[in-house]
């Protein structure tokens, strides 16, 4: 049994959609790795030059426009006095066209600022938009408003951390 030309074209398109979804998953997983390691070079390779971000937490709101502003915010906040973990789960990715996609990711994160003695943890639902240019997917728009957030302050909330990647690789900042 052979398939028709139109069936083959549809199969080819379906395979491309699956490849695009996988590429976007890899992009977002690399994004979380880049955030937690403050790897600005990696993040620059994932963020569109015109990226926009809007993040709303219980004690913060970030509005960022452009790759350079985004990278500066990460470098400044994910610094040598921080230990953090961001996990994205349950991706819901829709390919809108050959060059545009949307995604929802369930975020769970833990963020210790050891200098200020603040522990923040919580969840959110990232709502992302991606564009494909020259064969590469880029994150162009990202938003979340916290589902819940817990902020604890003081020495009693700071663990005895014996190893921290950002202590060596994060930016040194003045408070």
Image: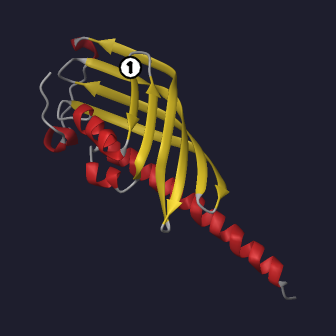
Residue displayed at 50% across by 68% down: 135
**Quarter of the C terminus within the rendering:** top left
Residue 122 image offset from top left, x and y in percent? 45, 24
**Quarter of the N terminus within the rendering:** bottom right
Residue 7 image offset from top left, x and y in percent? 82, 77
The secondary element bearing badge 1 is classed as loop
Q: Which residue is mark 1?
A: 60
106 and 40: which is toward the camera: 40
Q: Is residue 76 visible?
A: yes
Residue displayed at 28% across by 26% down: 112
Please indicate whether residue 64 sits to the left or right of residue 96 in the image. left
Q: Is residue 36 visible?
A: no
The crowding category of the residue bearing disc 1, from other C-alpha atoms within 10 Å (few below 14, some 14 to 19, many at least 20), is: few
Please indicate whether residue 17 sits to the left or right of residue 127 in the image. right
* Furthest residue toward right: 1
Residue displayed at 66% across by 58% down: 97
Residue 71 image offset from top left, x and y in percent? 29, 43
Indicate how the structure is coloured in the image.
Answer: secondary structure
Tell me how many marks there are. Answer: 1
State which quadrant residue 57 falls in.
Answer: top left
Residue displayed at 35% across by 46% down: 67
In the rendered view, would you say 68 is above or below 146? below
Residue 42 image offset from top left, x and y in percent? 31, 54
27 and 61: which is toward the camera: 61
In the rendered view, would you say 20 is above or below 150? below
42 and 161: which is toward the camera: 42
């Amino acid at each position: 049994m052979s398939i028709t030309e139109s069936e083959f074209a549809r199969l080819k398109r379906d395979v491309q959609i699956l490849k695009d979804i996988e590429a976007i998953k890899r992009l977002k997983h690399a994004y979380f790795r880049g955030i937690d390691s403050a790897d600005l070079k990696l993040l620059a390779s994932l963020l569109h030059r015109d990226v926009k971000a809007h993040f709303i937490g219980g004690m913060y709101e970030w509005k960022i426009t452009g790759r350079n502003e985004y990278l500066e915010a990460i470098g400044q906040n994910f610094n040598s006095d921080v230990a953090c973990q961001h996990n994205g789960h349950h991706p819901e990715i829709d390919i809108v066209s050959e060059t545009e996609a949307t995604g929802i990711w369930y975020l769970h994160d833990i963020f210790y600022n050891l200098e200020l003695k603040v522990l923040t943890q919580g969840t959110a639902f990232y709502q992302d938009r991606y564009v494909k240019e020259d064969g590469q997917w880029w994150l162009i728009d990202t938003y979340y408003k916290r589902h819940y957030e817990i902020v604890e302050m003081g020495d009693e909330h700071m663990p005895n951390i014996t190893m921290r990647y950002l202590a060596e690789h994060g930016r040194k900042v003045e408070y």
